[in-house]
Image: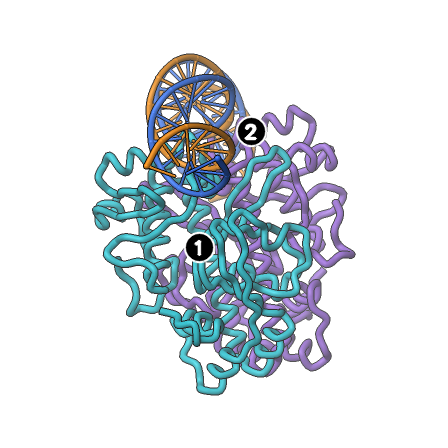
Chain colours: A cyan, B purple, C blue, D orange
Amino acid sequence: MNPASDPPSLLFVRKLEVLTRFAAAEREGLINLPIVVRTIEAGRDIVREGEFSKQSVLILDGWLCRYKVLPSGARQVLSVHVPGDVPDLMSLHLRLMDHSIMAMTEVKVGFMSHESLDILCSEFPRIATALWKETLIDASIFREWMVGLGRRSATQRVGHFMCEIYLRLQVVGLAKDHKCAIPMTQSDMADAFGLSLVHLNRTLKELKEAGLISLRHQTLAILNWHGLVKACDFDPAYLHFSPQIREG
Amino acid sequence: MNPASDPPSLLFVRKLEVLTRFAAAEREGLINLPIVVRTIEAGRDIVREGEFSKQSVLILDGWLCRYKVLPSGARQVLSVHVPGDVPDLMSLHLRLMDHSIMAMTEVKVGFMSHESLDILCSEFPRIATALWKETLIDASIFREWMVGLGRRSATQRVGHFMCEIYLRLQVVGLAKDHKCAIPMTQSDMADAFGLSLVHLNRTLKELKEAGLISLRHQTLAILNWHGLVKACDFDPAYLHFSPQIREG
DNA sequence: CGGACAATTGATCTACCTCAAAATTGGTGG
DNA sequence: CCACCAATTTTGAGGTAGATCAATTGTCCG
């Protein structure tokens, strides 16, 4: 879906065009954005809390997550990111990182300098607005996760995530027929849902035994979409997809 | 601190100037922003999840919170807002509200139409950037709350909030000498920290008995700032104050 | 002074945690 | 192709932070 001849920025343009219709010049400006492509091995940090960031990363392939670690050693995964996402877009204006970003799998990323993004934004204000919107959707997802962490049961939290990630992957063509890859360890998931590893494992087992999902070899199948949506109280409104996309 | 003769927009300008140094024209544009002032009684919703928003509210006096309610009836408070905040700034670009906003006290708010904000942003790109930054800090606070909800104990969550709100109030001149008003019921706090009302009450008691805080008649005093900061693992970096502000 | 709401306390229960070990999986080198 | 290692997943057993249910007390106001 992304031939070698395509510039890496094309994925970025496509993602933004889900929300914004660009003029030809804007599109061109985006496509010509200088991007430095690099491959990073699984487990490596891309940026660390406390660092000053001078660039943002576009994910071209693989998954990555944002997290914070407490003095106790406990880790909270704040978000999970898939191809097309720019997880640290916020650093464009908040240069001091308040969290870290780690490769969950081997990832291919494109580095976009803040300098060139700034220039692009001032030349094309509608691009600035499109990027701003991306950061707002990011925040909306945080809010929904907060609801899960504060008020949903372990089972609902896990199921809710499965629904969310399936839809997000579907938008970028990486999921269909209620199946997708989830290249996370159970330890990663536990840290994302605020659970212990042991309890996460039991929660997954419960969802499997209820016939709602199957998950093996990092491959998720949602066996009963409507059942899962209902059980976990999933409503995709918070993803702010344009009207024509919303469904399961 | 805000004489009757001052236009309500002045509070907004002051808040934004914490992060951005404006040119005279920009400042003037902001001050002339048309604002409709209204008073709203405690407990009333200002916007509801699912509505389309055509304006954003600037808090002039009083507190308000954002929240979501689950089908079970459980409520999660997502954030708490004080004078100077524009809690639904996100609706400027995500018009469909994914959460509700409620007055926690009687509040005096200023309504700013999205139309006039849009015009201001396109005329003064640096104002757009300043607003974007505000939404990014908002998201940063969500991230920190996620860490609390997922990985901190009840005691730490409560204490952490006390530190945060004290500093945020201090910036707008509403707190000093480690004292400030916290016009929230314990029920509101419980919903903000993902706790039951009963447990929240016991947690407060614990912090009081440890000599870290006092809280009576909605008045908070932090009796041992350093002790509290240490016990709750509080680090204000996530508030992204400019360097000269950071301290307790 | 009464009524409504908010705060506090008691008693019991449970969802999820921690500690510990075993089983499974995937990758590597011989 | 197999043996082995390290990482991951799974299961068992027992403990606890925080939930729920149920009063009681305090506070604010009209």
Seen in the picture, residue B67 relative to A174 is either above or below; the reply is above
Q: Position of residue B156 (x, y in %)?
A: 59, 34
Residue A141 has which mark? Answer: 1
Q: Which residue is mark 2?
A: B203
Q: Where, by quadrant of the figure, is residue B245 drawn?
A: bottom right
Q: Nearer the viewer, residue A182 or C15?
A: A182
Q: Quadrant of the C terminus of chain B?
A: top right
Seen in the picture, residue A225 relative to A19 is either above or below; the reply is above
Residue B145 has which mark? Answer: none
Report if residue A98 is visible in the image. yes
- Dot 1: element: helix
- Letter of the chain that mark 2 sits on in the rendering: B
Horizontal side of residue A19 vs A67, given as left or right: left
- Amino acid type of disc 2? Thr
How would you rate the neighbour count of disc 1 (Cα within 10 Å): few for under 14, some for 14-19, many for 20 or more? many
- Letter of the chain that mark 1 sits on in the rendering: A
Horizontal side of residue B247 vs B143, given as left or right: right
- Dot 2: element: helix
Seen in the picture, residue D27 relative to A115 is either above or below; the reply is above
The residues bearing labels 2 and 1 have C-alpha atoms spaced at a distance of: 29 Å
Q: Position of residue B134 (x, y in %)?
A: 59, 63
Seen in the picture, residue A210 relative to A12 is either above or below; the reply is above
Q: Nearer the viewer, residue A176 or C5?
A: A176
Q: Residue furthest right?
A: B244
How would you rate the neighbour count of disc 2 (Cα within 10 Å): few for under 14, some for 14-19, many for 20 or more? many
- Amino acid type of disc 1? Ile
**Which residue is at a point 56% across and 57% down the rendered structure image?**
B138
Report if residue A19 is visible in the image. no
Q: Nearer the viewer, residue A65 or B15?
A: A65
